[in-house]
Image (cartoon, helix red, strand yellow):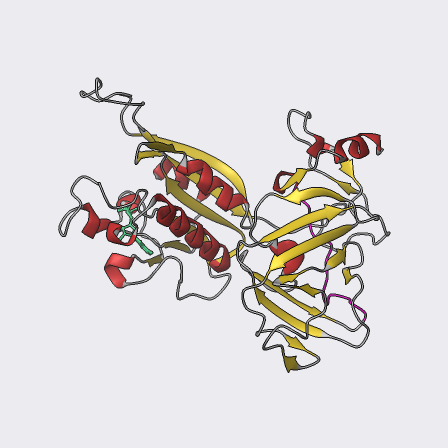
Amino acid sequence: MENVARLWIKEGDVIADVTYGRGAFWKRLPEPYAKHDLALDGVDCRDLPYAENTFDCVVIDPPYRPGHGSKGFGENGMAKAYQLGLLDTINDVLDLYRAAIVEARRVLVPGGRLMVKCQDLSYANRLHLVTLDVLRDITENGFELADQFLLVNTPNLSSGAWKRQERARRSHSVLWVALVRRTMSPDTGTGAPADCSHNYLIKMKTSTRGESPLSATAGYASLVVDARVRYWEDAEINGVSDEEGDLIPLKEGDSWKPVIDLAAGRIKDWPADKHADIHFKVCDDGDYWLADSEGKKLAKWRGHYVPDAFLCVGDRGYGDYIIMKVKCDGQIEGWNFPEIDAEEWEILQHNEKLTESLP
Ligand SMILES: C[S@@+](CC[C@H](N)C(=O)[O-])C[C@H]1O[C@@H](n2cnc3c(N)ncnc32)[C@H](O)[C@@H]1O
């Protein structure tokens, strides 16, 4: 941790270690300002008792594997020390990581640093590249990757029982360092709204190898949304709570299906007699596309969680909510042209020709 601190912790940083455990990280460093752990003080790293923008740095090191089958699992063993009884499956572990990362994003200041320790593992006869899942969760939740540290436990890739061994032992853990991403307009890089010409040309980030169609310039004009909403009732249409979800325009079955003009921040075909204060819980049940000015879908959002930069306007939804105020002309209040991160969108096959032909 001293090596990590040398590069990524500054004097005077307000730091939270939210899975403090026995505090091994801080043996040779000053103690963090906030130290919490479910087993120590009952504070859950997924629900921290701090306001937004509190910390310069958050450190997360949750249990990296599910409890059952762990050596020493039991009342006084690892299970007790690491709260493993709460994590029955590998998905529980991944959910904990993700929720902790989302919560860290909330309490970190802009430009703040996240440090997450994680480890790949063989579990239930399968190899789980947990470090990659965690990395995806980091980049999908408002951070950009800044550094990677490998902590090698043992260089020995097989155990004494190698004849029974099925695959190499996981002999290292990874500590990801990530920075809270600052949202910038694509052209100015200043955070100011970009030029609002209709079919706005977005310069996609160029991949280092320059071979992906994602690196091309693309004419994205709109965001096409198909969000399966869990709770409609927190929205108000013309000041009235939409208890059954039958007041909101552009609803089809259980889905909300607006098409948003990206340059203007206006919802197409919005009825002139309605204004809305939208607060929909969606979570991971949605599909989102970037489309051209004809409405042809060109790229698909890689995740299923809500793309916050587009659909949480002036608020934070942590990938779970759509939050925005819509005026009578369909204009989304406070709209800022969102940054489009090429890595978060999968170019659809039929788009390759289009991207090649554009200047
Ligand atoms: C791998 S240990 C952390 C070790 C720690 N970095 C150290 O230096 O000792 C994982 C810790 O996460 C804690 N934990 C498990 N679930 C948690 C949760 N939801 N919120 C906060 N802490 C949690 C466990 O009690 C345990 O102490």
Quarter in which the N terminus is drawn: top left
Q: Main secondary structure of the magenta part?
A: loop
Tell me if residue 151 comes above or below residue 244 in the rendering.
Answer: above
Tell me if residue 283 comes above or below residue 291 in the rendering.
Answer: below
* Residue 103 located left or right of residue 61: right
In the rendered image, the residue lying farthest to the top is 163
In the rendered image, the residue lying farthest to the left is 76
The foreground one among 40 and 162 is: 162
The foreground one among 14 and 135 is: 135
* Residue 67 located left or right of residue 218: left
Residue 159 location in percent, x, y? 22, 22
Residue 333 included in the magenta stretch of the image: yes
Q: Is residue 13 visible?
A: no
Q: Is residue 162 visible?
A: yes
Q: What are the residue bounds of the magenta stretch?
A: 329-341
* Residue 331 located left or right of residue 86: right
In the rendered image, the residue lying farthest to the bottom is 240
Residue 58 location in percent, x, y? 42, 52
Quarter in which the C terminus is drawn: top right
User: What residue is drawn where x is 80% and y is 54%?
Assistant: 263
Residue 267 included in the magenta stretch of the image: no
Residue 296 location in percent, x, y? 78, 45
User: What residue is drawn where x is 71% and y is 31%?
Assistant: 213
* Residue 257 located left or right of residue 119: right
Number of numbered callouts drawn? 0
In the rendered image, the residue lying farthest to the front is 253
The foreground one among 125 and 261 is: 125
Residue 348 quadrant: top right
Tell me if residue 146 comes above or below residue 210 in the rendering.
Answer: below
User: What residue is drawn where x is 15% and y is 49%?
Assistant: 74
